[in-house]
Structure formats: C-alpha cells, structure tokens
Amino acid sequence: MITFMNNSDSEEEPCNERTSLMSAESPPVPSYQDGLQASEAGEAQAHRKRRAGSNRGPNNITGGETSGSGVPVRERALENEEEELTLKYGAKHVIMLFVPVTLCMIVVVATIKSVRFYTEKNGQLIYTPFSEDTPSVGQRLLNSVLNTIIMISVIIVMTVFLVLLYKYRCYKFIHGWLILSSLMLLFLFTYIYLGEVLKTYNVAMDYPTLFIVIWNFGAVGMICIHWKGPLQLQQAYLIMISALMALVFIKYLPEWSAWVILGAISIYDLMAVLCPKGPLRMLVETAQERNEPIFPALIYSSAMMWTVGMAKPDTAARGTSQQTWDAAEDGREHLRSPSHAESQMSETRSPVPTRPVTALEELEEEERGVKLGLGDFIFYSVLVGKAAATASGDWNTTLACFVAILIGLCLTLLLLAVFKKALPALPISITFGLIFYFSTDNLVRPFMDTLASHQLYI
Amino acid sequence: PAFGLFLFTIARDPLRIIILIAGAFFWLVSLLLSSLIWFIAVKASDPQDERLQKGLLIFGVMFSVLLQEAFRFLYYKLLRKAIEGLVALSEDGCSPISIQQMAYVAGLGFGLMSGAFSMINLLADALGPGTVGIHGDSQLYFLTSAFMTMVLIFLHTFWGILFFHGCEHRRWWEIAAVVIMHLTVSGSSFCNPLYVGSLVPSYLLMAASATWAYLLSGGSAQNLQRFLLCKC
C-alpha cells in the first residue's frame, strides 16, 4: 500500500510536527494554572471585573496588556487564595484529563484486541526504514536505534520548521497544513478503520452508505475541530483522531523501534519544553508575546469558555489557535501539557487580553480547564496499545501500564500546580509505563500464572 | 459488587478517584517487588525439584502478603502528609476528605487492583471455547475463583479501614491482626482445590472484618436497624 503509506507519511508529518511542536508549546501546567488562577480570582471576587487581568498579571508580566497595571497589586493579595484553590480544583482538573485519556486508551485497546488488522505486520513507514527481521539480537537493536534516530530527527525538523513558520508569520501555510492533515486523518483513516472493523465483525455495508457516513463524520469533525462546535463533540473528535493515529503507529512501527521511540520521544519532550532554546518553548513564548492563540486542533482542552454573548468571534472559537494563543499568552500559567500545545489555553484567557471587561462577564460561567496536547494522547495510547498487542500476559500488563500512565499524569499535574509553568506531559508517564510494562511482562506474569494455576491468592 | 461500590461511592468525587488509582498503583508496586524476589529465587533454584518449587511459591506468597501490608503502611504515611497539605490549603481549616474515607478508598483501590489481576485473565479465557476442569481439576474453577476474588476485594477494603484506624490510634495489635488475617486468607487458599478449606474461612473472616470495620467507623447496631427499617 504505497499510496497509503505515503499518505500516512504526509499525514504523520503534520501530526508529528504538530505534536512535537505542541509539546514544546503546550506546557501542561500553564493552562491548568491559568484556569485555576482565573477561577480562584473569580471566586475571590466574583463581582470583580478584573479577574482575567489579575490572573494574568502576576504570572505574565511581559504579556500583560490592558489590565496589567492595576492588576498586579490585587494579584498578590489574591495569590494566597489562588494557591489554596489551586489544589482544590486540582483534583477536578485531573479527573477532567483522566477521562479522555482513559477513553482513548479503551478505544485503542478494544480495537487492538478485536480487529486483527492492527496487529499484522504489513510493512513499515518510510520513517523507519530499517527492518527488524534480522537474525541476531545486536543487529535488531542497532536497527531499532537507527529507526529511532531517524524518527526523532524527522520530528525535530518538523518542529523547527513549524516554529520558523510561526515566527515569520506564515499563518496561512500553517493553517493550510493543519487542515490538510486533519482532513486526511478524518477521512482516510476513518475509512480504513471502519473497513477493518466491519470486516472483523462480518458486517456488510454498501458503498453509498459508507460514503454518507464517512462524509458526515469527516465534515462534522472538520467543523468541530477547526471552528466552533459543542465542547463535548470536539473533545470526542479529538479523542477519536488520537486513537486513530495511535493505531496507525502501533501497526506500522516495528516492535523494538516502538519502545525505543517512546523512550526517546519522552526525552526529547523533556528537552524541547524545558531548555531555553527548545523549539516548543520558543513557540509558546512567541505565541505569548504576540497574544495569539496556539494552533487549533492540536490541543485537547477540558473546558471552554462560553463567550456566547460576546461579540468577539475569537473568544467564541473554541479549539482554534486563537484560543490557544490567548491562553498561551495568559501566561506561562498555562502550563498545559507541553507535549502538545494544541490544547487551547483556557479560552477564558483569550478574551481577557483584549477585552478584560467584557470578557469577564462571561468568565463567570466558564471553568478553567487544563489543556493537554494531542500528541500526549497519542503516545499514551501507543504505549497501552502496544502492551495489549504484544504482551503475552495480556490484560495484566495492559492494566498495569494503564495505571502507571494515569499516575504519571497525576504527578505531572501536581508538578504543574507546583511549578506553574509549562511542563512536558510525556516523560513521567511514559517512564512509568515503560518500567511497568517490562517488569510486569517479565516478572509479574510468571508469578501470577503460577499462582493462578494453583489457585492461590495473595 | 466492587465495581458497584466504585460507582456509587467514588465516582462522584475526583479526589477519591485519585486516591483510588494511587492505591492501586501502590499495590501494583508491591506486587512487582514481590514477584521480583520470587523470580530471582526461582531462577536461582533448581527447576526440576517440585517440592522446592512449591516451597518457593509458598514463600513467595507469604512474602508478597507482607510486602502488601508494608506498602499499605507506606500509603498511609503518604496520605497523612496529603491530608496535612489539604488542610493547610483549604479555606475553612478542615480537609475535604477525612482519613476514614481515605482508608476506605485506599482499601478499595488495593482490593480492586488485586482482584483485577487475579480475575482478568480468567475472564478473558472464559470468553473463549473450552471445558472447565478437563484434566481432572475441579469443575468449579471459575465460580470459586470469582467468589474468592470478591471476598478478597472486600477483605482488602475492610483491612484498609482497620489498618488505617490502627495506625491513627497507634494500636499495634490492630495492625498485627490485619497482617495475620491476610496471611491466614492467603494460606487458606493453599487448600485449593479443597474449596471448603479456603472459601469458608475467608468468608468468615470477611464477616468478622466487616463488623469490626463497621464498628470502628462509628456504626452500631442501632444505626443499622434504623437504616434498614426506615430510610430517612
């Protein structure tokens, strides 16, 4: 399937790039922080109009725009209260993220377990040219390491390219690229996925029906992700495309390469977000300086601002980049998952920079949410899916990886609350996941099998 | 039933979900360490010697039980610190979740994870074709496994409450009782497939722990009567 692979290649490019970029730019913490601070400030002074401004004030002094001046003072007074509210809302936000990550993983695991297609080896991506069918272990290891190096360098190149494009304001190009890639995801991958599922369950479907279904699905998806749409529908679409992407990765990445790539990408994520010269960090900073939203469709946001009454179309746009940028601006506070900055920084933040007064009225309603990049979703699901696909202890290993990833996410969000700046969401979770996968597969499985065969209980 | 417990009591409050998952994580880590020890022991010993293998298995089980309780203790310590943090951060000086609730949730987390690990492969195999006990093993394998798992989940929950209560009030004998009970239950499972030997004591112990935990949590016979007779 040369064409498919090409498509997926191009598809993946934007995805990789976006995700990598997003990682850099979407420190998971900030958005979370913003939301928290905003909500806290709001709680403290419900009638205050300067909520948004004040929230931003202390955190983003450089970016503070309209409400910057008077806000800092009030900010400090509020900071303590905000701190308190931080942890209180913390649990809620963590759950708001647990649910979509869990859903995505469930979809991926269910598909892997039932549909044979995704576990067959039908070739490799052009990004991982070295095959793993070599006789010796050393050769195989070498091949997987080389594959990883190629993949990571592709991602780095894409990320840097995107950052450059962003810096030089080639917005049209970026938007076109994103639209093209999401188009491809929504239509092509869904078509393949649906075909395979129908094949597995031996259900016949004629082409016209298929066409109508996929067309509707894709069109609504495009609108939801790139423009306006109900929050839950948008979240559902983002989860679905992450799952589809993860399935593609699981199918087309050879075994050892997949694990090494997971490890390498979390290291890359760590560096890209935290190093001062990291591309993702530069992207976030640039976005913040310009008070623009980060790219749409790259970030998953758990809450939206309901600026229905507002005249500003920007603020109303949900997932779009405008939001994300605004959010980014709102500050470093938006430490939303660095892995993929896509998450729209609390949209509430977006309107704030421009119209603090008007925006604030709407702010009362909304909830600050945390944003997590879509790349994070994808890689978490790849890990769990691979565990489900290749582990011989099957469900135990999958379950162990699942719990490990959730705990990693918890810890990352905790760090976010503590550090209040963008943090990479991948490293901790992926590390835990990898450790648990390998140890459960090799150590726990024989133990549990022996126990079960004797029906012993511990 | 455990899943029902989860839905009704935990799914509402996000903090409890986090504590639950963290509890499951701690159980998992304890399992990991104990299986590591067992694995090393097995590798270092002669695989042909049946008695030795069985002995090692028993040793592994006991060690695992002890390790689980140790991790329960560690988790208790962590939750104490967390409560202090929550109290400091809350507005009115009292934490949003009490230590008893945490004990319940932690116990449930442990139980769910242990139950899941015990049952899930069985369930997956049960979906497929096959005959139970075709090689002369008991035909009630699935049923007894299910019951045993359920009793173990409940036991873990009650032990959680008892354990935390013991730690709170520094009653070491409570903690020791929990450990001994756990060892007894695991030991009784060695009687399998003589199910009378394992299921019956386990259920009895569960009833005992349940009443003990209920009394510790402030319940009493009057409360129970009131609850059952009039739902107000």
Image: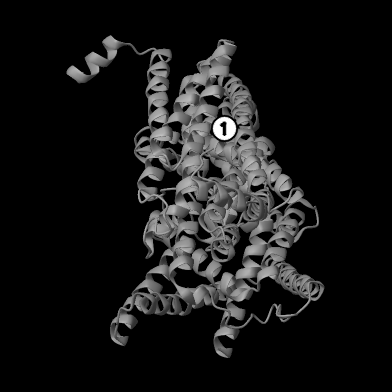
Residue B162 visible in image: yes
Q: Circle 1: is it few (<14), some (14-19), or many (20+) Cα within 10 Å?
A: many
Q: Is residue A158 rendered to the left or right of residue B151?
A: right
A407, A90: nearer the viewer: A407
Asked where in the image residue A206 lies, by quadrant, the reply is bottom left
Subunit of label 1: A
Residue type highlighted by circle 1: Thr
* Image height of A359 relative to A43, above or below: below
Out of A227 and A232, give the one closest to the viewer.
A232
Where the C terminus of chain B falls, by quadrant? top left
State the residue lying farthest toward the bottom. Answer: A2
Q: Which residue lies at the image location 51% right of the left edge and 30% below the top edge? A: B106
Q: Is residue A294 above or below residue A452?
A: below
Note whether residue A333 is visible. Answer: no
Residue at 74% across, 61% down:
A264
Q: What kind of element bears circle 1?
A: helix
Residue in the picture at 32% in, 76% down: A213
Expressed as whole percent of the image width and height from the top left, the position of residue A234 reads 42, 59
Residue drawn at 39 percent across, 22 percent down:
B210
Residue A404 higher or lower than A179, as above or below = above
Q: Which of B34/A115 is in front?
A: B34
Q: Quadrant of the N terminus of chain B?
A: top left
Task: Answer left or right for A216 relative to A456.
Answer: left
Q: What residue sits right under mark 1 in the picture?
A: A86
Residue A37 in the image: state x and y as whole percent: 57, 35
Residue nearest the observer in this picture, A1 or A20: A1
Q: How many marks?
A: 1
Residue A238, percent across and down? Answer: 48, 62
Q: Position of residue B230 (x, y in %)?
A: 17, 18
Q: Is residue A424 above or below residue A108?
A: above
